[in-house]
Image (cartoon, grey):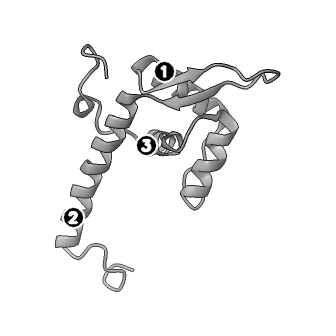
Amino acid sequence: MSPNAPRPAAILPVKPDVFMVLLVLLDGERHGYGIMQDAAERSGGEVRLQPGALYRMLKRLLEEGLVEETTCRQGERRRYYRITALGKHVAAAEARRMARLVDASRAHDLLDDAKYV
């Protein structure tokens, strides 16, 4: 991570769709359509990224240094994206932040399906 890069905590919280894109890219580089498919699959269909919104998000993530574009593969017009070191740190910080929220929810039995159906 660059010494001039922002601290991951300064970027938190990230929106659920951004977190999902970072999670998808942790498994390796993907093109936009692959990101949309993986996000929908991993979330059980809860995260459905629309192409226009995804590419606006990717542009923002590129500007923030959380993802980077990889070189085009020979004969392909698709752009591929991968997570950066800063993006990994932000994803980890966001996961820890959410884990603390889940722990607090457990302390109040909010995850007990029988109580809040």
Considering only order in the chain, which callout, 3 or 1, is on the residue closer to the N terminus? 3
Residue nearest the observer in this picture, 26 or 115: 26
For disc 1, the marked residue is 62
Residue 54 in percent (x, y) is at 59, 33
Residue at the (29%, 53%) spot, across then down = 98
Q: Quadrant of the C terminus?
A: bottom left
Label 2 crowd bin: few (<14), some (14–19), many (20+), radius 10 Å? few
Q: Vertical placement of 44 versus 81: above or below?
A: below
Residue at the (69%, 20%) spot, across then down = 72
Label annotation for residue 103:
2
Separation of marks 1 and 3 at Cα, in angstroms: 14 Å
Residue 13 in percent (x, y) is at 30, 39
Residue 27 in percent (x, y) is at 53, 44
Q: Vertical placement of 35 versus 107: above or below?
A: above
Residue at the (47%, 45%) spot, across then down = 23
Q: Which residue type carries mark 1?
A: Leu
Residue extending furthest bottom? 114
Residue extending furthest front? 74
Q: Vertical placement of 51 versus 45: above or below?
A: above
Q: Which residue type carries mark 2?
A: Asp
Q: Quadrant of the N terminus?
A: top left
